[in-house]
Image (tube, rainbow, N blue to C red):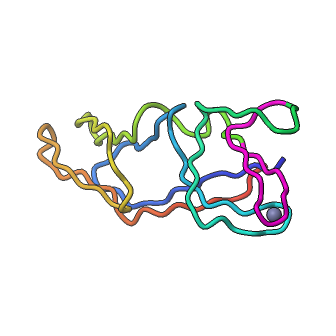
Amino acid sequence: MVKLALQMKAQFENVEAVYTPQPEFRYFLKIRCSGCNEESDKWHDVSLSETVALKTGRGNANFAFKCKLCGKDNQMDVLEKSVRKEGWVVEASEGGQKFEEVDLTDGEWVDYDEKLKETVRVFELEFKFIKSK
Ligand SMILES: [Zn+2]
């Protein structure tokens, strides 16, 4: 089985930590068949909290799809602890506020911390999947 890791890179301003929901966190992915390399044109959502029975009758996976082109059954699992904690949460530095349900879809987010009297900001966010061991 190939394991993929999601790498995240961003610039921070007054941020102590950023983390994501588990197990409800959904990866929205475009998927390529491991048999014929055909790419799906729609987004699929994969979550650790959902499982489907494999058509082969051998176990479950978090996501399964049959390639329309070559008929290969593909499957995917989200690994436990591959995403962490509840919500996209941003913790401000130096004992500042904790912001929950943060939306990082646009690759940046900004808010104002009343306690710190400072702007809290995440920007130039990039995601990249890499193969991991
Ligand atoms: Zn295929």
Q: How many marks?
A: 0
Q: Quadrant of residue 31?
A: bottom right
Q: In the picture provided, is 35 more to the left or to the right than 13?
A: right
Please tell me in which quarter of the rendered image ligand 1 is found.
Answer: bottom right
Left-right relation of 62 to 1: left
Q: Position of residue 33 (x, y in %)?
A: 77, 61
The residue that appears at 52% across and 35% down in the rendered structure is: 84
Vertical position of residue 18 compared to residue 32: above or below: above
Expressed as whole percent of the image width and height from the top left, the position of residue 82 reads 61, 39
Q: Residue at x 66, y 51 (%)?
A: 5
8 or 1, which lies in front? Answer: 1
Identify the residue shown where x is 82% and y is 50%: 73
Task: Pinpoint residue 76: horizontal percent, then vertical percent.
Answer: 73, 45
- Residue 63 among magenta residues: yes
Q: Is residue 74 above or below residue 70?
A: above
Does residue 56 show up magenta in the picture?
no
For image coordinates 73% across by 45% down, the residue present is: 64
Seen from the viewer's position, the closer of residues 91 and 40 is: 40
Horizontal relation, residue 62 to residue 91: left or right = right
Percent across and percent down for residue 32 are: 72, 63
Of residues 74 and 55, which is closer to you in this image? 55
In the displayed structure, does residue 126 sit left or right of residue 42?
left
Compared with 80, 117 (above or below) is: below
Out of 8 and 22, give the one closest to the viewer.
22
Q: Which residues are magenta?
A: 59-76
